[in-house]
């Protein structure tokens, strides 16, 4: 069977197919990103007979159309949304959705004497030589009457030139637009590959993009489910948009979905701001036990994963499962409690989590475990926290993770989650990992590395104080004025044989401390500033931090995984210091993990 077909469609036929939902445009309720100049240029290209590029559609079996009919082969538009929306605006006179989710008109004017197109302005509106809104001409009941009225306003124009150009303008309705239709039996990966090869810009479409497009084909319900995902993600980063959505999208506002996400209008949380791809992935795990976003497309298409055949009776069940999963995902109680759980593990700031997938799977796991009413809340929290930290340390959700996700979520459903987690820990977090692999992973200059950030999370969870600080905790420093401090100062190392960033910026040479302490230490080596601390403790005149005695100092150094040799470290023993501190940092992480 051919993978695609190439056809031509007149502009009016194309718009009619869109109006009847024969061609579905998933982006119609999303902000229109073209400016009016691009709309004008599109009309000018059609007028002059220039090519405007191919539209790319993908057949969708079992989609709902207006009036309740079911399409045998509805086309989902996967490339060309902006061009179609521009045509609807300029030719059909329909409104587009602006950035405030408000319907607005983009009005294109035409001068039939100079053959110019322009965005309507007050000056053009007052000039009788211009047709101020070409959509009025295209939708006129009597083009002849329209022409007669124009000539009455402009008696001096050359009638033959005007009539010829007006006929040329009307010809836009019959201008041919190429459509590449991809077959309905192609999987998402093949569709994506074809799209990239056809699209001259080579911009890839993700499987989540296809899933969002597919969701929107299921009539009003599908459009609103799609908007539930879109608006949830948008409000997570821009709570003020709630008023715009409520006021300007009456269709969505009339559903219960808006109320389900209304709590976001008062939310200031930014630890986990999922994009629609993240929501799709979590919904796939929760609703279908599937790790790939493309699997949702197959499910919503009614495709049986065993036989690969389409069964349209599966489609409404799939939408029910998707809706049920999404309503769990956007639930305020679930979302807030999950974030409290992650923060209780020490990950209190967005910069500490460099794996969105680790959060995605942990959230799906949390929601899945909530379905087990017999599981104690404490056990549920323990499993989710340990799983999240384990995945941060092992990179379990990086690279080609989808098959791992599916295996994990399936095994969690088949056996005790606690037993399965223990099996993974015994395999991935062996004694060799803690003693060898983890210290080696801490040999890095990246402060966003998951290993260094997990060390900081361990300090937060342990309520550890900043380096040489009595009262200010690492947690407080994340939220206020804490510095990442070079334990062996950079200037000192640069002047004593370590000029490279890769040497002095090792994370094992970093500690969070108060700004004032960082300034006091300046460029002194540890042998110097630790001797000063000892002398000041003995004299009772300590000004560096608030350490009051030698026992308190020892506790503070232990909280920051400082080797006993710290007071003797010089440039000559710097490398030995790094090795020892990495071991201690790994030990802190291990103790923290085992205590979760």
Image: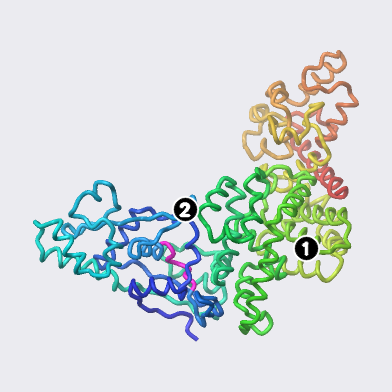
- Report x, y in % for residue 268: 65, 43
Magenta span has 80? Answer: yes
Of the numbered discs 2 and 1, the one sitting upstream in the chain is 2
Query: Of circles 2 and 1, which is in front?
Result: 2
Foreground of the two, 411 or 252? 252
Q: In the image, residue 225 lies at what x, y percent? A: 60, 64
The numbered dot on residue 102 is: 2
Residue 115's image quarter? bottom left
Residue 460 placement (x, y as % from top left): 79, 39
The image shows a total of numbered marks equal to 2
Label 1 CA crowd tier, 10 Å (few <14, some 14–19, many 20+):
some
Q: Which secondary structure lies at badge 1? A: helix
Magenta-drawn segment: 76-82
Residue behind mark 1: 368
Q: CA distance from mark 2 to mark 1?
A: 37 Å
Q: Is residue 359 left or right of residue 26?
A: right
Residue furthest out toward the right: 551
Direction from residue 172 to residue 390 in the image, left or right: right
Say which quarter of the image contains residue 105.
bottom left
The answer to whether 585 is drawn above or below residue 367 in the figure is above
Above-or-below relation of 470 to 316: above
User: Does the stretch in magenta take in 290?
Assistant: no
Q: Residue at position x 13%, y 56% from top?
A: 154
């Amino acid at each position: 069977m051919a993978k695609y077909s190439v056809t031509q469609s007149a502009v009016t036929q194309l718009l009619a197919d869109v109006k009847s939902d024969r061609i579905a445009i998933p982006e119609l309720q999303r902000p229109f990103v073209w400016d009016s100049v691009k709309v004008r240029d599109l009309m000018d290209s059609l007028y002059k007979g220039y090519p405007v590029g191919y539209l790319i559609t993908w057949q969708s079996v079992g989609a709902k159309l207006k009036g309740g009919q079911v399409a045998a082969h509805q086309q989902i538009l996967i490339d060309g949304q902006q061009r179609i929306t521009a045509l609807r605006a300029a030719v059909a006179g329909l409104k587009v959705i602006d950035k405030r989710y408000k319907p607005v008109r983009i009005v294109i004017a035409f001068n039939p004497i100079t053959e110019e197109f322009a965005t309507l302005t007050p000056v053009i509106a007052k000039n009788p030589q211009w047709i101020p809104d070409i959509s009025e001409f295209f939708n006129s009941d009597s083009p002849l009457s329209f022409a007669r009225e124009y000539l009455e306003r402009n008696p001096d124009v050359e009638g033959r030139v005007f009539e010829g150009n007006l006929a040329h303008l009307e010809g836009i309705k019959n201008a041919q637009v190429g459509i590449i239709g991809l077959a309905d039996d192609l999987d998402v990966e093949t569709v994506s590959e074809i799209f990239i090869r056809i699209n001259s810009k080579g911009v890839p479409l993700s499987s989540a993009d296809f899933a969002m497009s597919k969701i929107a084909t299921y009539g009003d319900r599908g459009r609103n489910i799609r908007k539930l995902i879109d608006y949830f993600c948008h409000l997570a980063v821009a709570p003020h948009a709630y008023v715009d959505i409520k006021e300007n999208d009456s269709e969505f506002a009339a559903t219960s979905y808006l109320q389900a996400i209304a709590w976001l209008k008062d939310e200031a949380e930014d630890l986990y701001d999922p994009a629609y791809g993240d929501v799709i992935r979590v919904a796939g795990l929760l609703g279908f036990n599937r790790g790939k976003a493309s699997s949702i497309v197959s499910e919503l298409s009614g495709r049986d994963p065993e036989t690969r055949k389409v069964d349209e009776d599966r489609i409404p069940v799939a939408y029910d499962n998707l809706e049920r999963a999404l309503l769990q995902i956007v639930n305020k109680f679930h979302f807030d409690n999950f974030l409290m759980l992650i923060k209780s593990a020490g990950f209190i700031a967005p910069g500490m989590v460099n794996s969105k997938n680790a959060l995605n799977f942990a959230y799906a796991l949390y929601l899945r475990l909530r379905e087990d009413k017999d599981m104690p809340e404490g056990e549920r929290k323990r499993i989710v926290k340990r799983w999240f930290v384990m995945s941060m340390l092992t990179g379990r959700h990086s690279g080609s993770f989808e098959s791992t996700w599916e295996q994990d979520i399936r095994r969690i459903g088949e056996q005790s989650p606690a037993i399965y987690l223990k099996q993974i820990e015994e395999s991935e977090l062996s004694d060799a990992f803690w003693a060898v692999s983890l210290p080696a992973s801490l040999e890095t200059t990246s402060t966003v590395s998951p290993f260094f950030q997990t060390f900081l999370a361990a300090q937060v969870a342990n309520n550890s104080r900043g380096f040489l600080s009595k009262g200010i905790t690492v947690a407080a420093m994340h939220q206020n004025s804490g510095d990442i401090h070079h334990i062996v100062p950079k200037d000192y190392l640069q002047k004593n044989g370590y000029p490279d960033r890769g040497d002095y910026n090792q994370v094992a040479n970093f500690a969070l401390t108060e700004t004032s302490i960082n300034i006091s230490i300046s460029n002194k080596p540890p042998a110097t500033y630790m001797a000063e601390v000892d002398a000041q403790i003995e004299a009772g005149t300590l000004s560096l931090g608030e350490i009051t005695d030698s026992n308190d100092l020892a506790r503070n150094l232990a909280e920051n995984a400082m080797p006993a040799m710290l007071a003797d470290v010089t440039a000559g023993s710097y490398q030995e210091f790094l090795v020892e501190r990495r071991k201690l940092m790994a030990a802190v992480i291990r103790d923290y993990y085992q205590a979760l």
